[in-house]
Amino acid sequence: MTDIYEQTREIFRPAGLLSKRLPGYEPRESQLSMALAVAHGFEGGKLVVEAETGIGKTLAYLIPAVLSRQKVVVSTNTLNLQEQILESEIPFILEHIDPELSALCVKGRQNYLCLYRWEQFVAQPAGGVIGGSETTARISAWLNETETGDRAELDWLEDSSPLWREISTAAGQCLGNRCPKEKECFITGLRRKAAAARLLIVNHHLFFSDLALRREGHGEVLPRYESVIFDEAHHLENVATSFFGFSVSHLQVVDLANDIVLAASALPEKRQERMKRGATALQRGAEQFAAYFPVRSGKFPLQPLVDQKPGWEKAVQSLSERLSGLEGKLLSHTAEGEVWQALATRCGELQARLLAAAGLLEMYGEESYIRWYERREKSVALSVSPIDIALELNDALYPYVRSVIFTSGTLTVGGDFSYFLGRLGLDRDTDTLSLASPFDYGGRTLLYVPPHTAAAPFPLPNEETFARAIQQEIYRLLLASGGRALVLFTSINSMHRTHDFLAGRLQYPVLMQGQAPRSRLLESFQRRTDSVLLAVASFWEGINVPGESLSCVIIDKLPFEVPDDPVIMARMNRIREEGGNPFIDFQLPRAILALRQGVGRLMRTTTDRGLLAILDVRLFVKQYGRMFLKSLPPSPVTRDIAAVASFFAPEK
């Protein structure tokens, strides 16, 4: 065995360093197994580890990564996990395992203030209107203290603040080494530190943004690394899809026009007016192009629109010509400063993306992509997405790294890794390890599914009476649990209707997603031990509320996606064309993994206790229900609401 393997075993053994030095540490055989598998993985190759809640997977991959002495990137799905690693695990490793470790958290550039844009902002009369004089003064004071320029340090600045958009830098707006503030730039400083660091902590969006840039030969965001660890790896397909494709929106064109107007204010009056007229014409062209699309909000395949509406090519060419004409004008001003070259480059890039997304510019591997558009209330975006990211990963990532390690609490379907391996382009003989949660689901939880008999059938989700039936069932369950529940929905409408039904009937506070920022809702939910929180989407995962406040997780129905997303439809069609079954091979695994994430909100510590309730009788009346049940924690199952009342009775 290698030194890293033996060192890892010594640290994680029952009487090892963690037991001696980490307060509250409990040695777990499953954590040791994962750590040893990761240590072996760093010798080269690929490893997939499903580590359910309570394993302690973060230390199980971080410590072998540090011991390997390789340059390693740890990629997570959320900033929260990035910050947890940097603030909790890294200080312990520095103190007790590797005092010389250099670790750095790297975020996307939009998280950092741009000194050049800041100077432009404060010099404009509109600056005080957008930001307010007090806010501007506070940021000025902060800039005298900060070493990073990271907006996370501004905990008082609202997430939705329009000010930050004006003073941070998106990739297309950066002047790079042509910027007059390049030497003081926070991004430049961050890159220097990243080059020297041995452990980089990033999120999936930044990782795949960097990978896409490398693939296209447009430079890089991250320095070269030897190995990568993907935590929260069940998100990889969705994130990679957005970066291995590309988008162009009419708002990007409007932003460009606004930046041109801002830059033009430094020109002599006559040239300033000419440039502003060109920018205004571009903005008008962007609005006309957006008006070409139907007003119905949503995501739609592009080709049916092109087939049904005449004049598509003319509409695209009209906006393309405006971009091209303005690019020429901008290039004629490059002697006035570097900003003009950067603006001209943005014009050219937007034009190229527009033509490619619209189908007027041929792309390599055309048959491997789907073109689609998204209409929102105030914007339209054209996108091109890969149908299969497995090809992209095998081309752009796997050949260039020594080791790739994937981990998450939910990677298997019925105990099988096949779905995950296939979607990520991993060979069937890839090393895998599945580690069950050490929590006592058998003794501390109960799974409830409504009864369904010939005499009293509980309605199926497609029946008209389903909505009313689940409202009444949720009400009965909440009375039995004394509130203390997270209720997860598959649709916003269902959540709102249930909130209206419960609000006048329950004596407990009924909170609902959207009423307040996520962090404030969770804080209120945890503080009030009898409250009820209704939520959708993002609340199905990443919620960590240990203790009595979350003693019940109720899920309205099995989370099958409505297959109206153009990318999802394209993937299902591809599976069908290749002789597969889209429902069994794609929709079912995705629903099972989503359900596992939802039920995972209940047990967060060994002392937690509670009810899982899934109000969808398809678990028992459909053949595929057995696959869901096989994938759930080993909780005792009841179909009797009286058993739920008995389960909670000892606590009352």
Image (cartoon, rainbow, N blue to C red):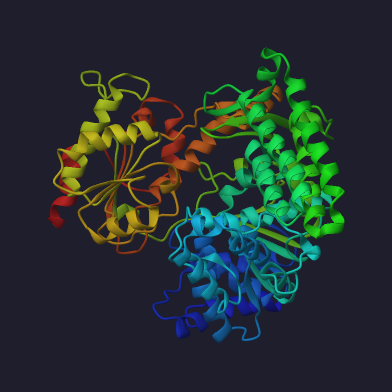
Of residues 358 and 45, the one drawn nearer to the viewer in this rendering: 358
Q: Is residue 553 above or below residue 191?
A: above
Spot occupied by residue 401 in the image (x, y as percentages of width and height): 77, 60
Q: Is residue 422 above or below residue 509?
A: above
Q: Please give left or right for residue 256 compared with residue 439 in the image.
A: right
Is residue 639 among the parts visible in the rendering? no
Of residues 541 and 160, the one drawn nearer to the viewer in this rendering: 160
Spot occupied by residue 409 in the image (x, y as percentages of width and height): 50, 54
Query: Residue sitting at 61 percent across and 73 percent down?
Result: 148
Query: Residue sitting at 51 percent across and 49 percent down?
Result: 410
- In the rendered image, which quarter is residue 489 located in? top left
Q: Is residue 86 above or below residue 23?
A: above
Spot occupied by residue 42 in the image (x, y as percentages of width and height): 70, 67
Q: Please give left or right for residue 48 compared with residue 637 in the image.
A: right
Is residue 388 among the parts visible in the rendering? yes
Screen quadrant of the C terminus: bottom left
Screen quadrant of the N terminus: bottom right
Q: Please give left or right for residue 395 compared with residue 16 in the image.
A: right
Total tally of numbered discs in the picture: 0
- In the rendered image, which quarter is residue 82 located in? bottom right
- In the rendered image, which quarter is residue 546 located in? bottom left
Of residues 229 and 371, the one drawn nearer to the viewer in this rendering: 371
Spot occupied by residue 269 in the image (x, y as percentages of width and height): 74, 51
Of residues 39 and 63, the one drawn nearer to the viewer in this rendering: 63
